[in-house]
Image (cartoon, helix red, strand yellow):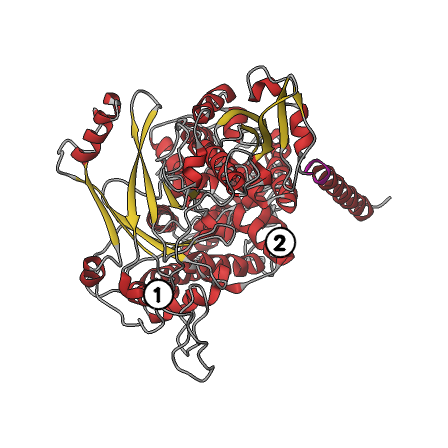
Amino acid sequence: MSLPRLSNLARHRLLWLVVLCLLSLGGAAQAMTLAQALDKTPPAQLFAGADAYGAPQGDPAIVPVLKAGQLQGYAYLNSDFTPSTGYSGKPIRIVVGIDPKGVIRGINLVEHHEPIVLIGIPEAKVLAALNGLIGTDLAQVASGAVKPPQAEIVSGATVTVLVMGDSIVRSAVKLIRSGRLDGVAAGAAPVEVKRQLDPAVTQTADWQTLLGDGSVRSLVLTVGEVSKAFADAGQPAAAGHPEDADPAAPFISLYMAPVSVPAIGRSLLGDVAYERMAAKLQPGQSAVLVAGDGAYSFKGSGYVRGGIFDRIELMQDGQGLRFHDHDHTRLPVLAAQGAPHLKEIALFVVPQDFTFDPTEPFDLQLLVQRQTEGRDKATLPFDLAYQIPERYLLPAAAPAPVAVPAASPVQAAQTGQPMPEDDGPALWKTMWQMNHLNLAILGVALAVLTAIFFFQDVLTKYPRSFLWTRRAYLSFTLIWLGWIVHTQLSVVNVLTFANALLSGFSWEYFLSAPLVFVLWCAVAAGLLFWGRGPFCGWLCPFGALQELSNTVARKLRVPQIDLPWGLHERLWPIKYMIFLGLFGLSLYSLSDAEVYAEVEPFKTAIILKFMREWGFVLFALACLLPGLFIERFYCRYMCPLGAALAIPGRMRMFEWLKRWPECGSPCQRCANDCPVKAIHPEGQINVNECIYCMNCQVLYHDDTRCPHMITQKARREKIARSAQPGSGTKPAPVAQSKDAHAQPPAFRAQKAAVTPPPDLKGA
């Protein structure tokens, strides 16, 4: 059987293996039913002394819980009433026991896939936090008399606990309001006259006017005020760990406004951005702008890890909503005249499954976290209340507005209804205009790199100049591209792109991040021309961090480890297996794949600059540490993005890395000097592993280190000497060993070199 046939057979087997794995995963993904959940929940765990369950009632089902035949209350599954997706991207299923009066009596966590609980935080600690909701009268919350309670935060599992607590409260409120509990009447929520937005109010305003009339509400806190609040709440440890020694130092200035209200949205976003936002909203859907400045971030880092903004919650009518990353759009500036430059500006779209009315009062709750002892944190909520100013509303007693003819220039201003299209630029074009300076810098950098590749034959003839050119470019990649503008590509980008091709591709999604889009276009062009080398060797901030740290290690005389070729070659497939695993998982659940993509330390080391939980920091350092002894260790053996780029990189068009006939047989100089050992002992370059550092091209032109060039130089010098006057005198023969003439000329030339070559890597 021929080698190509074996290769095809292997590929077919791999494909079938992936298909079988996906089918098995799909079979395991069936939703848990209430009956299955009750099989794992003894009645006594929900109500003291209970001994049996009754027959299911209604849809979604609730089940009576009995004690000696007497009704104690009802059991239900939280995910049947409200979304409960957590950090893992999968539902968290909790059986809740509630008595006829709407009081929580018991909780049982029956299913979750939260990685932080599975591998880190003890489940008992999470359950203890949730048990704090037992005994809470949620009928009061359903009636609007009190605000929803919040489970005690568990340090390290904030997102998970918040989602669990929110789902318990929201599902119970929904059940109570349905009137299916005997002791609580249906529709317990207060009934008020429905107000409507006034379509005649379209005038924009400046920042001070918006603040003055209440269109934008603010919450301003100092460090001292937050410390006092923690002390009053009985948490002296948190009060003793202020963010600043000066109590008057600003802690946060938080601003909020419903920008789906046309006049407010046009004032804060500008006409073009508002029109495009409104066009994407469904009828009745709303959007809220949240902005902040100061020492405390309302965004935090939870949305980076788990996709949930765990520090803010939108609350209305006894229900709470925590925004996800797919609800969020980052804004660079506010359009209102006189608006300050704020550190964080976020546009959040309210999901359609959350009932929200901007004409009714609502709150934004800010969850303030402070370090206490070790990794423990204390939390304290601060509320920012909002009531839309009366001038945006029609009078309460006004009759229903008459439909306006289509030809009228003023249409009914319904929240979320698209406004008439104009000829203004799309929102993604506005984002490109806002990033024009960064795009120009990136364009110049890519042009410089292209020039380096096109003129590599000239540059590599000057080893030291080329060495410092490369180090300067890598420093730019690490500092500006990585740490300043956070343009670190990831395997998540590859998985998202593949998922978009399968589920409905949209250019606007990818165009909304201009720097990432341009860099990916450059990488795609580089793949066609030279393979994965341009990105991995020059444009990857984490790769630059590895190479520069190894350079420093060499300066400090850290010993370098040279792995045997056999071991080195067998470690290559690891990164391909990691990528295939992530790709297969992404076909089943993209959110799960994003969680496991943390095998890339890029987010920790580059995006967050090591400002993260210690577990992630330790993992990132563990990936960097071997690189001090084995250059680019992570790139060689573990990087799934490198593996993803290597596969299409085999279609490259150019072979610009030159080789001499002696390369590999017998000369091994380039193979030994290759930073990632991408040159086989036989002399050929493995393009799947080559990072295009051009070290082999520097050697190719070096007549002090390359045996071929040394031989050529010796011949030229011999010819030059023979052409000089008086060269007819025959020199005395030099004694040679018996097998000297049996050695290749290149080896004899290399032995004849008097001065040892400089170590340019450690220079």
Q: Residue at x 50, y 62 (%)?
A: 282
> Where is residue 625 shown, x and y percent of the image?
43, 29
Quarter of the figure with residue 390: bottom left
Gap in angstroms between the C-alphas marked 1 and 2 = 66 Å
Amino acid type shown at disc 1: Ala
Residue depicted at 18% across the width and 61% down the height: 208
Q: Which residue is mark 1?
A: 397
Residue drawn at (50%, 19%) of the image: 124
State which mark lies toward you, 1 or 2: 1
Find residue 565 and report its horizontal and vertical position in percent.
Answer: 61, 32
> Foreground: 145 or 677?
145
**Front residue of this view, candidates 453 and 650:** 650
Helix, strand or loop under label 2: helix
**Pointer 2 residue:** 648
Outermost residue on the top side: it is 49
- Residue most toward the right? 1
Q: Point out the tag, 1 or 2, that comes first from the N-terminus.
A: 1
305 falls in the magenta region:
no
* x, y percent for residue 595: 53, 38
Residue 726 at least partly seen: yes
Q: Position of residue 296 (x, y in %)?
A: 27, 40
